[in-house]
Image (cartoon, rainbow, N blue to C red):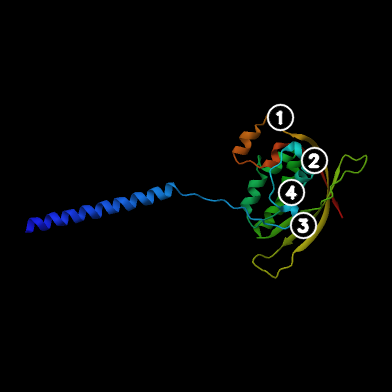
Amino acid sequence: MKRFLWILVGIMLMGVTFSILYFASAIYDAGDQMHIEPYVFQPNNLSSRRIGVPMSIDQMKDSEIMDALVKKFVTEYFYVTPDIENISRRKRRGGILSLMASGDVYNQWVDGVVPELEQMAGDKMLRTVRVANQIFKPQGSDYWTVAYELKTWDVPNDMAATPVIERGVLYLKIAFEKQLRDQMHGAPFNVREYLDNGGDPAAIFNFRVDAVVHGRN
């Protein structure tokens, strides 16, 4: 009788073991067969800010590329977040502004503008940049006229704080060709390798700011 009970218990344990193995394998297979369905939501009602079909450089107008690059440059030139490390990354050689500007313009920015940005970031201030849509070069001039607006919040974590608004004008001397660059500061430049390594796409265009003059509205 005792032997029979042990045989029965053994059979039951085998059944439990096979059940556990079955459910474990079923869960494993379910993980392999998982399917993720992607969805894209419309983040903005303005057509200019909607996600669209990617366009090649040949499909875009020269002025569209130029304006986008100018806005990127001016934004990088002025914006501030409450993070001193953000300023440190941006002012390093190889940062996006150093790649979009000549050596003289980059050095002038580091010496003349960056100290203010560092102080603001250290004081936990926030500054946003808005560039006017109309970017133009007067007839006979070598400089493009770029109007901008800065909004600065001096006090962090105060939802009732009113930003300080400043308006100004930059006059930019720009070298631009509607093509992807094959050199960067005289050295060969591989666009695909640069992008694969997480580089900012603004740097891949044949665009360079050679001079910056500050003005006022």
**Residue sitting nearer the eye, 35 or 148:** 35
Q: Amino acid at mark 4?
A: Tyr
Quote the CA–CA distance across marks 4 and 2.
Answer: 25 Å
Q: Which mark is residue 100?
A: none
Quote the CA–CA distance across marks 1 and 4.
Answer: 23 Å
Q: Amino acid at mark 3?
A: Leu
**Residue sitting nearer the eye, 35 or 216:** 35
The reply to whether dot 1 and dot 3 touch (C-beta < 8 Å) is: no
Which residue is at 79% across, 43% downward?
64
The reply to whether dot 1 and dot 4 touch (C-beta < 8 Å) is: no
Left or right of 207 on screen, residue 93: left
Mark toward the start of the polypeptide (2 vs 3): 2
| Secondary-structure class at tag 1 | loop
Which residue is at 63% across, 51% downward?
86
**Residue sitting nearer the eye, 166 or 198:** 198
Mark toward the start of the polypeptide (2 vs 1): 2
Asked whether the viewer can see residue 188, the reply is yes
Left or right of 199 on screen, residue 73: right
Residue 201 vertical placement versus 168 (above, below): above
- Which residue bears the numbered disc 4? 77
Mark toward the start of the polypeptide (1 vs 3): 3
- Which residue bears the numbered disc 3? 150
Q: Which mark is residue 186?
A: 1
Residue 153 vertical placement versus 79 (above, below): below
